[in-house]
Amino acid sequence: MTVDPRWVRLGDALKARRTELSRAVDADWRFRRRFVDAHHLDYRTTSDLEEHRRDNYTDATYRRVEAAYRWASGSIVAILEGGEPAALPLDAEPDEASREQLTLQRLQEGDFDTVMAAATDALERMSEKDRARAAGEMIRILHDLIREDKEGGDLSG
């Protein structure tokens, strides 16, 4: 089987970024298992990405992986298209993708009360226009998650 060089490039970039993060943030992250556990990713999915074993992932998986590797949203697609990832500062506050990953993690762990309290608080602070936009985005995200689940996708990563 011939491996698409774009996916080899992505796998190499992911491994290099994890190594960089292990030097700057947490030395244990040089071990894939510890990195995956720390970021609540699926081990097999992460391994498949780093070792370029397949090329069929969902957008939700891209977002979770980008957040864990501290890349801006769209970085995986950029690499696959021949560009470079947009690395986030190592000490940066969590971006939207990171917050989304944490919310999904909490939902998967059954921590619905915390997620609902945070969502309610955020909605109460929004303007009417932003609240309508947020509702539309929530519907899109839930639709994507349901579709992913029906297609046999792995919601954990």
Image (cartoon, rainbow, N blue to C red):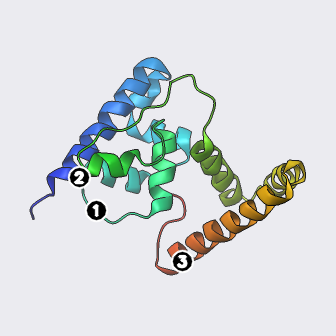
Q: Up-down: is 70 above or below 117?
A: above
- Apparent side of residue 143 relative to residue 61 in the rendered image (left or right): right
Do callouts 2 and 3 mark residues in contact (Cβ within 8 Å)? no
Residue most toward the top? 24
In the image, 46 versus 137, the foreground residue is: 137
Q: What's the residue type where badge 1 is placed?
A: Asp
Q: Quadrant of the N terminus?
A: bottom left
Do callouts 1 and 2 mark residues in contact (Cβ within 8 Å)? yes
Numbered disc 1: secondary structure = loop
Q: What's the residue type where badge 2 is placed?
A: Trp
Q: What's the residue type where badge 3 is placed?
A: Arg
Please name the residue that numbered disc 2 is placed on: 7
Residue most toward the front? 129
Q: Which mark is residue 8?
A: none
Q: Up-down: is 29 above or below 108?
A: above
Q: Earlier in the sequence, mark 3 or mark 1?
A: 1
Numbered disc 2: secondary structure = helix
Please name the residue that numbered disc 3 is placed on: 147
In the image, 136 versus 113, the foreground residue is: 136
Real-space CA distance between mark 2 and mark 3, rounded to the nearest whole angstrom: 24 Å
> What residue lies at 48% left-to-right and 46% top-to-bottom?
73
Residue most toward the left? 2
> What residue lies at 70% left-to-right and 58% top-to-bottom?
107
In the image, 155 versus 58, the foreground residue is: 58
In the image, 86 versus 50, the foreground residue is: 86
Q: Earlier in the sequence, mark 2 or mark 3?
A: 2
Please name the residue that numbered disc 1 is placed on: 55
Local crowd size for mark 2, using a 10 Å CA cut-off: few (<14), some (14–19), many (≥20):
many
> What residue lies at 24% left-to-right and 58% top-to-bottom?
53
